[in-house]
Amino acid sequence: MKKVCFFGIYKSEFARNRVLIEGFKRHGFGVVECKVDPTELGSIEKYFALYREYRAIRKQKFDHIIVAFPAHAVVWFAWLLFGNRIIFDAWDSLYDANVVDRRLYSGRSIRGIRDFLFDWIGVRVSQYTLLHSKGTKDLFLSRFGGSPDRYIVLYTGTDDMLFHPLPERVKEEGEPFYAHFHAAFTPVQGVEHIVEAAKILRGKGVEVHIVGYGGRLYREIEEKVTREELSDVVTLHGRVPFLDMPLWIAKADACIGIFGDTEKAKTTSVPTKIFEYIAMKKAVVTADTLPIREVFVDKENILLARIADPGDLASKLLLLKQDKELRERIAENSYTLFKRAFTPQAVVQTLLQHLHD
């Protein structure tokens, strides 16, 4: 039997890892996880614990060794143990996420330099680097160099055992159109624009339900909803268990993607939640960006609106409410696309084709 090793300091249930682990199983691979939970140990203790796990499997032969997401802080360690056979599942640039998008600290700070080096070293010591969009590949090539053939674009997809169509809820006469959004409250999401769109739709039979969390920005949105008395059109549900997310999506008439006016949103981000939505056969409206157009076609399997434009988002949500035929066609076509290209089996099939070329 072919075998693949997932190595690192990661959680198996994280969306990216769930998909790859399940996908390899469906392709007949034996899956060995050599890992420690990132929440259970301190920063230094994690590496000692991971080395102990490695010693237990070091004599096994593997066809592929994947340093699982988040891999940046551990890929150098995997290289010391396995050599450059490793596949670095970067997914995204750590430097770009923390310095450019979230602006947690300066690129010249110690942590900014650390993040840059984690990205750079990961690319240098790995046989392949996995990224989640063509825009991310372009970013890595321009910032870290290397051969284009060593970068593999692997769209995240989602686990269709968790996210799949559920029976539609029978709506009562006059019940509002239910638009669902979920995510951490980070700049790329553009939650503030979604709330403004809901405000514009007041009195038009549309409610926006937001599931998620995120520190200061969440508190700002919460205060805005209270201050402007928006509770009739916006409901903040806070953090919910991830395994319950399909039940929240199932309630929706349509789902909302990202609208943040950031470089990441415009050039590299294909949100995981969009794959979760289409796996449940939901019509999606999201910002019109290059990464989204890598995968989707406007009005065929998605509905696009101008980025950071609450008025345009509001008009597109109203269109989905009023045009049931359009809504159902988008939902059906996006689900067909998901089944063809973004199930765990399809995602790993794409990876294996690259590895065997």
Image (spheres, rainbow, N blue to C red):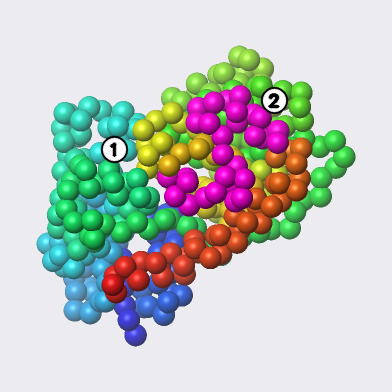
Which image quarter holds the C terminus?
bottom left
Q: The N terminus is located in which quarter?
A: bottom left
- Secondary structure at badge 1 equals helix
Disc 1 residue type?
Answer: Asp
For the point 67% across and 17% down, which residue is it?
229
Query: Which mark, residue 96?
Result: 1
Query: Which residues make up the magenta segment?
Result: 291-319
Question: In this rendering, does residue 148 appear at all?
Answer: yes
User: In the rendered structure, which amino acid carries the disc numbered 2?
Assistant: Leu
Magenta-colored stretch includes residue 303: yes
287 sits to left or right of 42? right
Please say whether residue 9 is visible from this viewpoint: no
> Residue 352 location, x and y as percent?
35, 71
In percent of width and height, residue 333 lies at: 63, 56
Q: Residue furthest right?
A: 173
Tag 1 or tag 2, which sits nearer the N-term? 1
Which type of secondary structure does the marked residue at label 2 adopt? loop
Which numbered tag is attached to residue 201? 2
Q: Nearer the viewer, residue 144 or 52?
A: 144
Query: Going by the image, does 83 lie left or right of 333?
Result: left
Name which residue lies at 76% across and 27% down: 204
